[in-house]
């Protein structure tokens, strides 16, 4: 009874209408969902099985306000991911699954260390188990229209997966947001990219490790992963370097005096384009990132996440730690402040593709322009001080 009361109060607080009406509204949500599911060839039996006993989950709604890649110093986030323990476990799993990884790498042309890194990031190499009912999680998000209609649509796709693959209802578990299995695929990603590498007829990203590797590799391949191209690497910039410079070929960077922090040579193809990235500002580590960095962001659209995945892959493969110190006072903008910044940049005439708080490299170049106008170091890194300069009051 206490849980039901808490749920009713949360619904009231979130949507501002009486609790009883909210309970009725959820029933209406389910009723309105059925024709759309039916149009996607979901049978009534599948629909009823998926939605049996499902109610809105207040924990799911609360979780939408917590994103680990945002609001936390980038260095702290990366150091919390790329730990000695995780590096060792990755090496152990590489040896355990060497033959499978040989086959996956040959078929999909994606390096094993990247696959292992994503596996480690998403499920701690399979040790972290999904605990949420995928249908309840997606229904909760669809019900409150969180990023509508994305999660509502994913709910219907999940029903189709259970039906097509004849998975038991109990197998359909996920993260709080509906990401499933050791690869953490959303239902639509499962449909588009899940691979049956083991050959048993069913892509199983929950318990079948070869399918997990094959699915991650297939995803990256479809997003144009380039085998042999680094995702990026830490660099040292010369004294007096003009941080307005953000895009150039490897050959051009070398002419400007940029060097790899690990002392290695740049890739042989000097014409490859890369972007100078200061994730914590010019006082912190600098990276040159390539198109493969964008592919990692396709898996999770976060710069910190992509650096962590790439760096973990490098470390498992014997690479060096990041050399430059992360600024102790690094305070990334919270999501609300990033959205306010995007709206301000749009008002100033810059092109802004979305208003979700993700600052892409085009916007970082726009930030550089504004930083220079206001006498700041043009490193493309938005800070509270920068917001004040351009007249944005941080939420």
Image (cartoon, grey):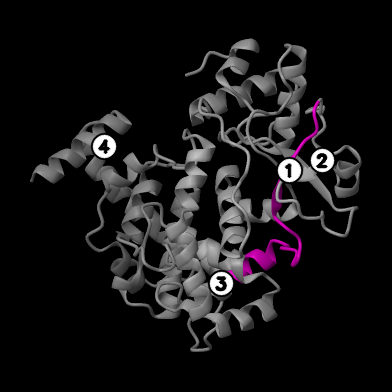
Is any atom of residue 234 visible in this view? Answer: yes
Q: Residue at x 41, y 68 (%)?
A: 126
Tell me the distance, in whole angstroms, between the alpha carbons under discs 4 and 2: 54 Å
Left or right of 26 on screen, residue 189: right
What is the quadrant of residue 162 in the picture? Answer: bottom left
Q: Earlier in the sequence, mark 4 or mark 2?
A: 4
**Secondary-structure class at tag 4:** helix
Magenta span contains residue 308: no
**Residue 215: which numbered mark, if any?**
3
Which residue is disc 2 drawn over? Answer: 258
Of residue 293 and residue 36, the one placed in the foreground of this image is: 293
Which residue is disc 4 drawn over? Answer: 11
Is any atom of residue 38 visible in this view? Answer: no
Magenta-colored span: 216-239
**Crowd around label 4: few <14 · some 14–19 · many ≥20 (10 Å):** many
**Secondary-structure class at tag 2:** loop
Q: Residue at x 65, y 37 (%)?
A: 285
Left or right of 385 on screen, residue 41: left
Q: Are marks 1 and 2 in contact (CB under 8 Å)?
A: yes
Tell me the distance, in whole angstroms, between the alpha carbons under discs 1 and 2: 7 Å
**Residue 143: which numbered mark, if any?**
none
Tell me the distance, in whole angstroms, between the alpha carbons under discs 3 and 1: 32 Å
Q: Earlier in the sequence, mark 3 or mark 2?
A: 3
Q: Position of residue 233 (x, y in %)?
A: 70, 50
Which residue is disc 1 drawn over? Answer: 235
Q: Residue at x 32, y 39 (%)?
A: 62
> In front: mark 3 or mark 1?
1
């Amino acid at each position: 009874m206490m849980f039901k009361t808490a749920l009713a109060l949360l619904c009231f607080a979130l949507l501002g209408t009486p609790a009883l009406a909210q309970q009725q509204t959820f029933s209406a949500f389910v009723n309105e969902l059925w024709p759309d599911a039916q149009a996607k060839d979901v049978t009534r039996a599948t629909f009823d099985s998926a939605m049996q006993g499902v109610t809105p989950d207040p924990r799911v709604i609360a979780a939408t306000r917590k994103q680990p890649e945002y609001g936390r110093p980038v260095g702290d986030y990366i150091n919390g991911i790329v730990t000695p323990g995780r590096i060792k476990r990755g090496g152990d799993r590489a040896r355990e699954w060497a033959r499978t990884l040989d086959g996956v790498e040959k078929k999909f042309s994606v390096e094993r260390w990247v696959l292992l890194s994503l596996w480690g990031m998403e499920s701690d190499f399979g040790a972290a188990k999904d605990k949420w009912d995928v249908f309840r999680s997606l229904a909760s998000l669809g019900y409150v229209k969180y990023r509508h209609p994305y999660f509502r649509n994913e709910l219907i796709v999940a029903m189709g997966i259970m039906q097509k693959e004849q998975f038991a209802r109990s197998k359909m578990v996920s993260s709080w947001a509906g990401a499933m299995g050791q690869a953490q695929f959303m239902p639509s990603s499962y449909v588009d990219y899940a691979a049956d590498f083991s050959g048993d007829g069913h892509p199983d990203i929950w318990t079948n490790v070869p399918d997990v590797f094959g699915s991650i590799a297939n995803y990256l391949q479809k997003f144009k992963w380039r085998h042999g191209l680094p995702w990026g690497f830490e660099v040292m910039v010369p004294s007096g370097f003009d941080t307005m410079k953000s895009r150039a070929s490897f050959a051009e960077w070398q002419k400007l005096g940029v060097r790899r922090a690990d002392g290695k040579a740049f890739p042989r193809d000097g014409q490859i384009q890369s972007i100078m990235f200061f994730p914590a500002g010019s006082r912190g580590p600098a990276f040159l990132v390539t198109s493969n960095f964008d592919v990692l962001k396709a898996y999770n659209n976060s710069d910190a996440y992509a650096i962590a995945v790439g760096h973990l892959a490098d470390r498992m493969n014997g690479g060096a730690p990041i050399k430059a110190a992360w600024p102790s006072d690094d305070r990334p903008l919270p999501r609300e402040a990033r959205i306010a910044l995007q709206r301000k940049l749009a008002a100033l005439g810059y092109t802004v593709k979305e208003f979700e708080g993700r600052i892409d490299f085009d916007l970082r170049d726009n930030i550089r322009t504004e930083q220079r106008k206001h006498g700041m170091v043009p490193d493309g890194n938005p800070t509270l001080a920068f917001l004040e300069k351009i007249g944005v009051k941080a939420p």
